[in-house]
Image: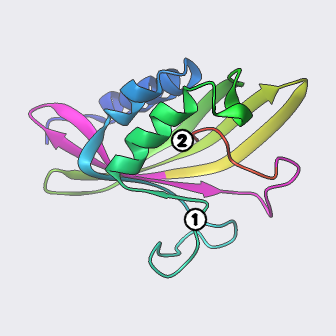
Amino acid sequence: MGITRQQIEDFLYYEAELLDEWKLEEWAELFTEDGVYLIPPTGYPNAEPRKTLFLVSDDHHRIVQRAKRLLKKEAHVEYPHSTTRHTISNVRIKDIQGDTIFVRCNFIVYRTKREVLDVFVGHHEYKLIEREGKIKIQEKRVILDLDALRPQGKVSIIL
C-alpha cells in the first residue's frame, strides 16, 4: 500500500475543510459510487441500518441529494448556513485489507447559529478505498458520544 497515515490525515482534514466551507457537493464527490454515510442512534454504535432506525443512513444517491438540498434556501434549518468547525484528532489506521483502509478518528464539531452553540462529539469510523494513489470514502460511520441529542434535538449539518 502506498498511502501513508499522513496522507489519510490530510484527506480527513480536507474533508473537514469542505464541510466548514459548505462545499457540500465537493464533499459528496469524496465518496465511492457504493459509498454510505451513517449516523447510528446514540447508544447503539454497532447497529445495522437494515435493523435499526438511524439518524442518517444515506447511500451515494442520498448523499448527493442531501448535499444539494442543504445548499438551497428551502432548507430552512440551515439557511442561512450555520457556522461550523470540524476538528479531528487521534487518527489511527485500524486495519488494511487489500485496497480498503479502516480508519478511526475522534471529532468535535462546533455549530453556531442564531446565537446558539451546539457541540457534537464522538468518533468517525471510515472505510477508505485507495486506488491509483487516490483516497475515496466507501463508508463513513459517525458515532456520537452523546447520551441524547440534547440540547440540539437534531442533526441538521453533516458531521
Residue 31 in view (yes/no):
yes
Residue 111 position within the rendered picture, expressed as x and y whole percent measured from the top left: 74, 31
Indicate the amino acid at tag 1.
Pro
- Residue plotted at (33% across, 36% down): 5
For this view, does 121 lie left or right of residue 30? right
**Which residues lie in the magenta part?**
125-152
- Residue plotted at (63% across, 31% down): 74
Give the spatial CA distance, label 1 vs label 2. 21 Å
- Residue plotted at (31% across, 32% down): 29
Based on the displayed image, in which of its 4 quarters is residue 97 positioned?
bottom left
Query: Label 1: which residue?
Result: 40
For residue 86, above or below residue 105: above
Based on the displayed image, in which of its 4 quarters is residue 118 positioned?
top right
Can you name the residue that lies furthest to the top here?
21
Secondary structure of the residue carrying numbered label 2: strand
Q: Nearer the viewer, residue 88 or 149?
A: 149
For residue 56, above or below residue 25: below
Q: Which mark is residue 62?
A: none
Indicate the amino acid at tag 2.
Asn
Secondary structure of the residue carrying numbered label 1: loop
For residue 129, above or below residue 17: below
Query: Label 2: which residue?
Result: 90
**Residue 142 is one of the magenta-drawn residues:** yes
For this view, does 42 lie left or right of residue 68? right
Label 1 crowding class (10 Å Cα cut-off): few <14, some 14-19, many 20+? many
For this view, does 30 lie left or right of residue 33? right
Residue 51 position within the rendered picture, expressed as x and y whole percent measured from the top left: 49, 82
Can you name the residue that lies furthest to the left here?
132
Residue 93 in view (yes/no):
no
**The C terminus appears in which quarter of the rendering?**
top right
User: Which label lies toward us, 1 or 2?
Assistant: 1
